[in-house]
């Protein structure tokens, strides 16, 4: 393998993948290497469907690691925009770096790439404007903001196929892909990044393993949320400039499709934002999966988190969605990732290493949920490995209050949203690194080191992470 490259990307999530795609399309002639700790997309599979429980895949979880990152196993929703929108309401802060109109054009361009590789041409959420308007007005009366934007749904299994095609395309066009390899360190000297130091993924716990240095003119960090903790370590080690970041802590909520039928039918995904009393923290729904399945995924140090999937072909009778509370810390404590990890660790202890599930009514009654109660519950859990228990032992009072008050608010808009048999799974946590300080070219305070995607705090979600990759390629080539 060539040990000197023009561009190295750390990670193979949508950001890195679409950067590589755009560099190929622009005939850049650059020597490009993408490095990933997980496997090729075609080799990624989750044993839980056969075993019924999480087996803690080694060395890394196949859902969170591998080509296309968590995107290959996500529900595969691409959030777009309405023509009349005067802002970008979903997906992070890319538009704050390149402007709203340029971001819209970038979304159009990136969406077309997805279509070329097999994405469903149907757009959800564009046919029933009048009906959606009525729901939005009803939400507004309850001090809730309902975001309606077009959604292109790939589906979990279809996303897997689509990213497999992209993997083959960029590799066939000269992009080198290094799998099952850990970027243990960056090579930074005199304020300049000139490469990375790697080791085999099997040596993840061997701190004495020999490191191989691979040099590059430019290094792009595209680690996603999975790599947020590593990125914090790099920032601390090399004094890379950051801004205060946040962590989203919450639960995965499961309820019958019949309760969510209007939003599911008219919008497919309704993104609801509120600031419930008494704390008025930002609380939002995220990743709604009609007729979907609750899932688990494993992060570093065997932290098990909950997520949700929705397939094109396989269906349940339940809808699941995340309810997340944004946590920002300043003085004297400013370690949002550590805080979130501690919440997750405590919940994992309560669930013996598994996701914990609890009925809403049991929380109201001040008691845990038992298996026999879950067995006769009207809402049947789709995550069979979840352990019934009491999530309030681990999620803080303020966060839990925010979630419960939010559920009550939404119930006034969507009748049945606060039904006692509805299920709360925990923990659902979205880790973001402290936001990296980057310039208009996405370059950090270290010359030659760039940052894109979710891990560095720029984006949230498949579409915007993909867009940031396209823009990164153009920045590197100095083109619009």
Image (cartoon, rainbow, N blue to C red):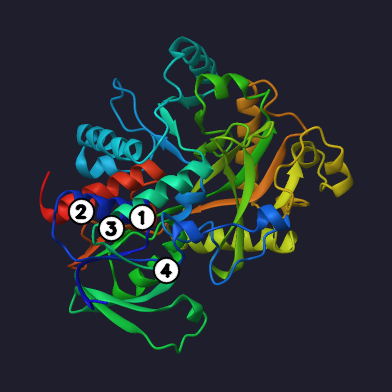
Q: Quadrant of residue 29?
A: bottom left
Taking the spot 48% from the left edge, 53% from the top edge, the residue there is 70
Q: CA distance from mark 1 to mark 3?
A: 9 Å
Quadrant into which the N terminus falls = bottom left
- Tell whether label 1 touches label 4 (CB within 8 Å): no
Q: CA distance from mark 4 to mark 2?
A: 29 Å
Q: Which residue is mark 3?
A: 172
Front of the two marks 2 and 3: 3
Of mark 2 and mark 3, the one earlier in the sequence is 2
Of mark 4 and mark 1, the one earlier in the sequence is 1
Q: Position of residue 107 (x, y in %)?
A: 29, 36
Taking the spot 21% from the left edge, 37% from the top edge, the residue there is 99
Q: Nearer the viewer, residue 442 or 465?
A: 465
Give the label on residue 230, or none: 4
Left or right: 403, with 91 as reference point: right
Q: Position of residue 403 (x, y in %)?
A: 62, 39
Q: Nearer the viewer, residue 351 or 2?
A: 2
Q: CA distance from mark 2 to mark 3?
A: 10 Å
Q: CA distance from mark 3 to mark 4?
A: 30 Å
Q: CA distance from mark 4 to mark 1?
A: 25 Å
Q: Nearer the viewer, residue 417 or 287?
A: 287
Q: Quadrant of residue 8?
A: bottom left
Tell me the SS state at disc 1: helix
Front of the two marks 4 and 1: 1
Q: Residues within 10 Å of mark 2 (few under 14, many from 20)?
A: many
Give the label on residue 167, or none: 1
- Tell whether label 3 touches label 1 (CB within 8 Å): no
Q: Which residue is mark 2?
A: 24
Taking the spot 43% from the left edge, 30% from the top edge, the residue there is 151
């Amino acid at each position: 393998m060539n040990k000197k490259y023009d561009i190295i990307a750390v990670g193979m999530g949508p950001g890195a993948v679409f950067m590589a795609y755009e560099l190929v399309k622009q005939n850049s002639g650059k020597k490009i290497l993408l490095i990933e700790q997980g496997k090729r997309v075609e080799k990624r599979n989750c044993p839980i469907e056969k075993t019924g429980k999480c087996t803690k895949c080694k060395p890394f979880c196949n859902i969170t690691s591998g080509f296309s990152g968590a995107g290959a196993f996500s529900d595969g929703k691409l959030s777009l925009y309405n023509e009349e929108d005067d802002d970008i309401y979903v997906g992070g802060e890319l538009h704050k770096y390149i402007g709203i109109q340029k971001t819209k054009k970038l979304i159009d361009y990136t969406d077309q790439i997805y279509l070329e590789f097999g994405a469903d041409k149907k757009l959800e959420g564009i046919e029933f404007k009048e009906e959606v308007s009525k729901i939005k007005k009803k939400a507004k009366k309850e001090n809730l903001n309902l975001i309606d934007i077009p959604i292109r749904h790939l589906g979990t299994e279809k996303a897997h196929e689509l990213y497999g095609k992209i993997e083959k395309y960029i590799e066939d066009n000269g992009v080198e892909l290094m799998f099952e390899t850990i970027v243990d360190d960056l090579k930074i000297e005199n304020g300049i990044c000139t490469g990375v130091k790697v080791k085999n993924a099997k040596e993840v716990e061997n701190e004495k393993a020999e490191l191989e240095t691979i040099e590059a003119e430019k290094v792009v960090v595209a680690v996603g949320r999975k790599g947020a903790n590593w990125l914090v370590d790099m920032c601390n080690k090399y004094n890379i400039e950051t801004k205060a970041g946040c962590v989203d802590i919450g639960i995965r909520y499961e309820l019958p499709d019949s309760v969510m039928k209007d939003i599911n039918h008219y919008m497919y995904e309704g993104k609801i934002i509120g600031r419930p009393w008494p704390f008025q923290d930002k609380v939002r729904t995220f990743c709604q999966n009609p007729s979907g399945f609750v899932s688990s995924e494993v992060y570093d140090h065997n932290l098990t988190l909950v997520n949700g999937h929705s397939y094109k072909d396989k269906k349940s009778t339940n809808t699941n969605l995340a309810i997340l509370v944004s946590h920002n810390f300043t003085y004297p404590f400013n370690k949002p990732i550590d805080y979130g990890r501690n919440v997750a660790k405590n919940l994992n202890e309560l669930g013996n290493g598994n996701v914990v599930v609890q009925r809403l009514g049991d929380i109201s009654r001040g008691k845990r949920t038992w298996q026999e109660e879950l067995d006769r519950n009207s809402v049947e859990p789709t995550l069979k490995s979840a352990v019934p228990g009491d999530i309030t032992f681990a999620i803080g009072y303020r966060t839990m209050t925010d979630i419960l008050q939010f559920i009550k608010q939404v119930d006034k808009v969507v009748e049945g949203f606060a039904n006692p048999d509805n299920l709360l799974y925990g923990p659902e946590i979205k880790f973001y690194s402290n936001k990296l300080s980057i310039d208009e070219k996405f370059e950090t305070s270290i010359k030659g080191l760039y940052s894109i995607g979710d891990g560095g705090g720029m984006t949230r979600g498949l579409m915007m992470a993909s867009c940031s990759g396209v823009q990164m390629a153009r920045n590197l080539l100095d083109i619009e």
